[in-house]
Image: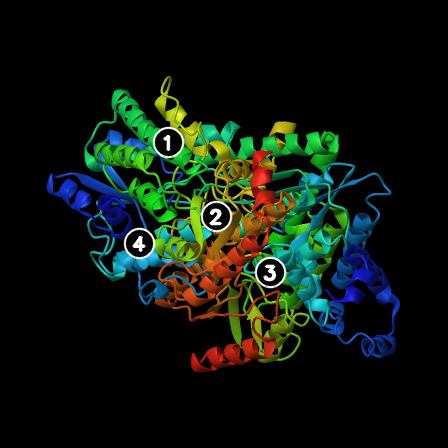
Amino acid sequence: MKKVFTEAATRLNIPAIQKWKEAGGKVVGYTCSFTPVELFYAAGILPVRLRGIDATSMEIADAYYGPFVCSFPKALLQLAGSGRYAFLDGVVISNGCDTMRRLDDCWRKMGQDMPGTAPPWFYYVDVPHKPDGHARDWYVNQIKKMMAAVEKQFHVTLTEEALGRAVRKQNNVRRLLWELEKLRQADDLKVTGAEAYAAIVAGTVMPRDDYAAHLADLIDDIRTRKADVAADRKRLFLSGSVCDDFDLISLIEESDAVVAGENVCFGVRTAEDYVEETGDPVAALAARYLSGSVCPRMLGWYRERASMHMQRIKHLKADGVILQNIRFCDLHGSENGLFERDLEKNGLPALRIEREYGPLVDRGRLKMRVDAFIEQLTSQKKSTLRGNHAT
Amino acid sequence: MRPELKEYNLDWLFAATFNVSRNLCNATPGELKAMFDYIPYVRPLLEPLLATGKPAMTFLDFFGDYYTDIVHARENNKKVVMTTFCFDPSVFHAIENLVPVTLEIGTALTSMLWKRGSSDFMDYCTEIGFSETGCSSQRGAMGAYLAGLGAKIDLVALNMGGVCDTNANAYSFAAQYLDIPYYGLDYPANLTSAEVQDYHHKDYRALIQFIQDNTGCRFDIDRLREVLEEKKKQDDLMNELEEMQRLVPNPVPGIYHVMIYAGRYIFSGKKKYTQMLREMVAIVRETAEQGRSGLKHGPERNRSFLAYIDNYSLGIAMIEWFEKKGISHVGSILSRTFAETAPYTTGVPGTSYRIDTTSLDTMIDSMADINARMPMTRTIRGPYDAPNMWLEDTISLARMYQADCCIYCGTPGCRNTWSNVKLLARDLESVGFPTHIVHADSFDTRVEAWETTQMRLEEFYKIRGLL
């Protein structure tokens, strides 16, 4: 496993960020995969996806959030309140869900109570809940407004040329990520879920050139490998709420399984997942970020999502699917219910689990359920499922 | 689900209940007393409701009409649209062959009228895959419709995306589960900018197109104008009640709030709803002239503002408890329309709506504006402390109605408010409003028994010296 990716995926203030800051660079955190990171790269700012890893308690977050909310934004607030995000020069919060958009309220309030815990700049971006027509036009305007705000706050000029360059660089990263996805589709799986996922998550915190080089290295390395890490193990697909820590994937892979792919708010989903490189870059960004309606926050687009995930699951040759949601994540919790029904209809066994975000306090319970699921898969005729993929 | 529940169609049950109840105007006090012994679970709502006199009979009458329409929708060649309480139904009433079903109304009714509320329906939703932590206000009645125990739903149309994703998610789930068309209006955080206004209007036009495409009907412009003109009258009557509510003592009975908003969510723009409001105004005016409070017994000892919604356990147990304690209920987030003519919208231009019936375009824009100012779509869309949002609304309304304290009641399924109610409570306390956060579920007493909620309310009022 590449150390640089493991480090980036398991720590917050990684050396690459420290180096960036030491060189006078600015760093902006963001909360949702619908945020067009290209505009920050174009401005010479490092966008860093906010993660709640390492939050071992919630005493600060509980002072602001109520008890009936998801532990992911609470973990973010807890870390911010503990000074772990002190390296940020700004934060972009969007309406990924009700609780996430209220992070804006809670963080601002906490900043008043505890000076130094809020970044110098907050920006709230309204992402529409539908992908086309007037909603897309709306998002084009929101991106333009955010660009203007970035220019003002960071004293930079966002030229069309710089934006075009950033789009091409990020597309290059997407192409590499899709190469990785294709390697995971092979009959002989050469990369574990933990290794692949570390590489994917690292892509949300590392500078572009650095990241692309390391990712290309990893892909080359995987191509030279011989051993099938999934031999005599079940290939699983992990789906649902945001999952940026490795405890869950490690837990799954400690059993007789390999995570062959995932849809948990990171990475690319399809071969067409690129920003158009010709024409108006802002319109292209809006189109790409809203396209596919990849998250259940895009209400009413379940069928399109299910169809897309079903294709991926088949291509990745998964024997089963683990559908997880963080407690109180109603969007994924409900969609997992529909998806479980449809997966089973298509002959793909699914396990639905609810969990808390962060340190796996319910590790024993989850391990038992994953083990039972794998046992269930093992008892089924392997050929039946693989046979389904072949058709 | 208990087998006996599967024996009845939910809409038919409600229709039958209300159609029988509306005949009670002819009953003698003795007959009523005898009847109450046979309906121990309906009594906690029916008895205080009937005590309001004429408005109660009109209320029961139009609720009977509402559910009868739903029951007979199919045989009358009408389509049934599933919608939410925050969606103003006037637009549906402007179409001949469309009948709305509002889930939260059904859930609240079962909570108020049935021994176990709608817990079986809620659990049914979980059985078929819906998140158990989803808001109970939808899960109750939704379970019945998804189980095929209510009207067959043809389409889903609502307005909660961006404001209450939990709510919109429930409707989205229902649409996917039933495999029917879905359209949700979407709301950005801001309310007053021209850009947002334009977005609201475009989104609403797309909704109309969706309805036309999926029902095969067109809007009758004259009918639409009639509905909106009626709505104007209703707004004026509600404004008059609101104005009188500023008096000390408050002449408006607490139960009126529930009747007014429940009526608005299903019968907005319909004549019978106007009639109920007229009857209420007449009664409140008389009470006010006599300098009395709207409380049934004793003097007004406290005025409480409900910063969110009410509790619908065991009839209207909370409102009855307020009555017993001498607490005037001065409204909740559900009570206000935010029409530009309302007394509480003065001085906050751009945050209210105006009904303009000049042309089809102006009427559609008016409806879009109304929908953007329904209880949640207006108040809890943006940052809680932004201008004209939850904090400012609560403080200005609490001050205007001279509230002594604020109470938050909601549901654990409300991600939106549970993500910032602690902040709201702190700020309300800091400007002088003692604030109590109720941890119960307004629609599901399994979360916290009403007796426990009551005990905690007792403690709050006592410790804070409010009674």
Find residue B38 and name its label: none
Instruction: Indicate the position of residue A192 as horizontal and vertical percent values.
Output: 37, 46
Instruction: Report whether mark 3 lies on the same chain as mark 2.
Output: no
* Marks 4,2: beta carbons within 8 A: no
Tell me how far mark 1 sits from mark 2, CA to CA. Answer: 19 Å
Instruction: Report whether mark 1 lies on the same chain as mark 3.
Output: no
Q: Nearer the viewer, mark 1 or mark 3?
A: 1
Tell me how far mark 1 sits from mark 3, CA to CA. Answer: 44 Å
Circle 1 residue? A179
Instruction: Indicate the position of residue A300 as horizontal and vertical percent values.
Output: 58, 40
Q: Nearer the viewer, mark 4 or mark 2?
A: 2
Residue A261, can we see it? Answer: yes
Instruction: Indicate the position of residue A81 as horizontal and vertical percent values.
Output: 26, 59
Q: Quadrant of residue A53?
A: bottom left
Q: Chain of mark 3?
A: B
Circle 2 residue? A236
Residue drawn 51% across and 65% down?
A: B305
Q: Identify the image quadrant of the N terminus of chain B.
A: bottom right
The mark that comes first in sequence, 1 or 2, is 1
Instruction: Indicate the position of residue B299 as horizontal and vertical percent values.
Output: 58, 78
Tell me how far mark 3 sits from mark 2, CA to CA. Answer: 33 Å
- From the viewer's perspective, is A316 left or right of B171? left
- Could you tell me the amino acid type at mark 4? Arg
Residue drawn 33% across and 31% down?
A: A176
The mark that comes first in sequence, 4 or 2, is 4
Find residue A108 and name its label: 4
Tell me how far mark 3 sits from mark 4, CA to CA. Answer: 30 Å
In the displayed structure, B462 sits above or below B156; it is: below
Residue B167, can we see it? Answer: no
- Could you tell me the amino acid type at mark 1? Glu
The mark that comes first in sequence, 1 or 4, is 4
